[in-house]
Image (cartoon, rainbow, N blue to C red):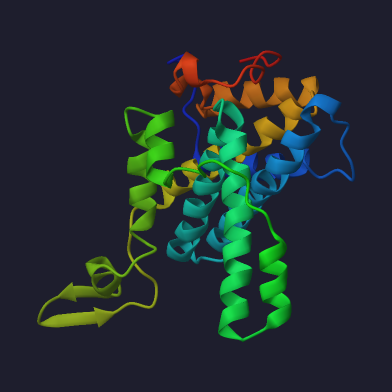
Amino acid sequence: MNDPSEPRPTEGDWIAWIREASELIDRDDFVVRVSDELVFKQLWGICVQTIRHARAYVLLVDAEFEREAMVLARAALEHAVTAQWAFHRNDGLSKLRVSMIRDEKENIEMVGKWFSDDGLLATAAAITVPQGRGLPSFTDMMRDLDEERFLENSYGSLSLAVHVRSTTQTSYFAGEAEDLLLRHEPSHALRGPATNMAAMAAMLAVAIIMELVDDQAALTRINEESERLNLPPTLRPGISEAKRRPGPGENTPW
């Protein structure tokens, strides 16, 4: 638990963490246990993309494209939550595999039909989708991991900048109805929470990678920053024990 006497983390602290998370995975190779090799292959890309979305968020904020950066914070959160759900649920990795293969087959088939491309259609036909159900909806994954719906509410807030809403119109005006001034940069108050979500996503992603490669020094560092920045390194506690996959979390500081 955080010491109330400790200074509260700032947006600058969260941004610094996003940059550090990116540095932690910047290696040419990792040593992975044989038992975790398949898991690593399934989650590596999702976790790296999470961190890249978070990094890109920072780049856009630095370039004063704050509202546009919200899209990337939202994407980072979606990737991180999906990786955490798949990593910690006892059926998560199998459902992830079904969804990834099924979606790939359907996408290739759709393009093949659109362009009347027999080669693509043959490629799609050769892909065998495993038996079983795929991933649930993203909303269901968030609710499965967080009954208090902090994740869902945060995701909804970030979505405000993604879809066309009334604020898309009003944010680009200032002044009164009879004396409107045009704005070229929108007014909004989401930057702080968005940076927090991007930093949390980066932590959830890098924690999975470092656990899979059993990098104890990195895990210790992640745990220290988790406590200092008040960011969770795992969403495993939100899953009921009966639904948890055995193994994850057993060799981590948390």
Q: Is residue 115 above or below residue 141?
A: below
Q: Nearer the viewer, residue 30 or 173?
A: 30
**Residue at 63%, 44% in the rendered image:** 97
Q: Report whether 60 appears left or right of 146.
A: right
Which percent across, then down, holds residue 235? 51, 27
Task: Identify the image quadrant of residue 207.
Answer: top right
Q: Is residue 110 above or below residue 211?
A: below
Q: Report whether 104 appears left or right of 1.
A: right
Please tell me how many numbered marks the rendered image carries: 0
Q: Nearer the viewer, residue 93 or 222?
A: 93
Task: Identify the image quadrant of residue 109.
Answer: bottom right
Q: Report whether 124 appears left or right of 41.
A: left
Which percent across, then down, holds residue 245? 59, 21
Q: In this view, does 179 lie above or below 24?
A: below
Quarter in which the C terminus is drawn: top right
Q: Is residue 32 visible?
A: yes
Q: Nearer the viewer, residue 121 or 187?
A: 121
**Residue at 62%, 62% in the rendered image:** 105
Q: Report whether 254 appears left or right of 168.
A: right
Task: Identify the image quadrant of residue 149.
Answer: top left
Which percent across, then down, holds residue 222? 66, 26
Taking the view exactly as shown, the residue that stands out farthest to the bottom is 115
**Residue at 54%, 20% in the rendered image:** 244
Which percent across, then down, holds residue 210? 74, 30
**Residue at 48%, 15% in the rendered image:** 242
Q: Is residue 84 visible?
A: no
